[in-house]
Image (spheres, rainbow, N blue to C red):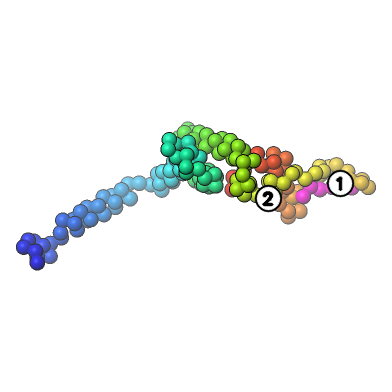
Amino acid sequence: MSSDPLEQAGAPSEEDRSEIGQRAAYEAELSRITSADMILQAAVSLLNLGGRRLGLAPGSEGERDLEQVRDAVDGVRALLSILERSATAQELRPLRDALSQLQMAYAREAQAAGGADSSTRQEQPAEQRSAPAAETKPDTPAVGGEAKEKPGAPGTGEKPAAGPAESSGRLWVPGR
């Protein structure tokens, strides 16, 4: 048993007081911070993580993972659309610049790795890896004078066909 009379009387221990103090500090921080602050912090963290996964940070060469970089870029783009509701374009410019730099570095790395091994080819959907299909313009008459419609044209209910840049795999498309 403890010889401390306060501890025996049910007073909080030093450990309990420390935990109570930490909890109070956390509650004070939560009352001060906004959701926009947290979203901005998450976007910055994703940009930093994306840079590490590209091997851009010193000592991070062994952490290279292009799929994680792509996810980080997509995440930042999604968070930017939310931040645009409460921040000005001027305030978001540094974030957009960093995102652009990460996208360019990702595109270079993905292109360089494109022919190196088959694992990076998994990062592109099959429709982007295949050669572009021949298409006719909607207003070009087909045999017999009828106009042919491209797949995915408005009103057909089909997904729009990938264009030449997209189907070559050289155009980075968010979410793909």
Q: What residue type is labelled 2?
A: Ala
Quadrant of the image containing the N terminus: bottom left
Helix, strand or loop under label 2: helix
Q: Which residue is drawn at 47% across and 33% down?
A: 94
Distance, label 2 to label 1, CA atoms, is 29 Å
Q: Where is residue 107 in the image (x, y as percent from the top left)?
A: 59, 38
The reply to whether residue 92 is in sight is no
Q: Where is residue 84 in the image (x, y as percent from the top left)?
A: 50, 41
Q: Position of residue 93 (x, y in %)?
A: 49, 33
Residue 141, located in which quarter of the rendered image? top right
Q: Mark 2 against mark 1, which lies toward the viewer?
A: 2
Q: Which residue lies furthest to the right in this view?
A: 144
Q: What stretch is highlighted in magenta?
A: 146-151
Q: Nearer the viewer, residue 101 or 94?
A: 101
Q: Which of marks 2 and 1 is nearer the N terminus?
A: 2
Q: Main secondary structure of the magenta part?
A: loop
Q: Is residue 90 left or right of residue 133?
A: left
Helix, strand or loop under label 1: loop
Dot label at residue 147: 1
Q: In this view, does 150 lie to the left or right of 95?
A: right
Q: Which residue is drawn at 26% across and 54% down?
A: 23
Pointer 2 residue: 126
Q: Residue at x 92, y 46 (%)?
A: 143
The reply to whether the magenta stretch includes residue 148 is: yes
Residue 103, located in which quarter of the rendered image? top right
Residue 24 sits above or below residue 51 on the image: below
Q: Where is residue 147 in the image (x, y as percent from the top left)?
A: 86, 46
Q: Which of 12 and 27 is in front in this view?
A: 12
Residues tagged 2 and 1 counted as in contact (Cβ below 8 A): no
The reply to whether the magenta stretch includes residue 157 is: no
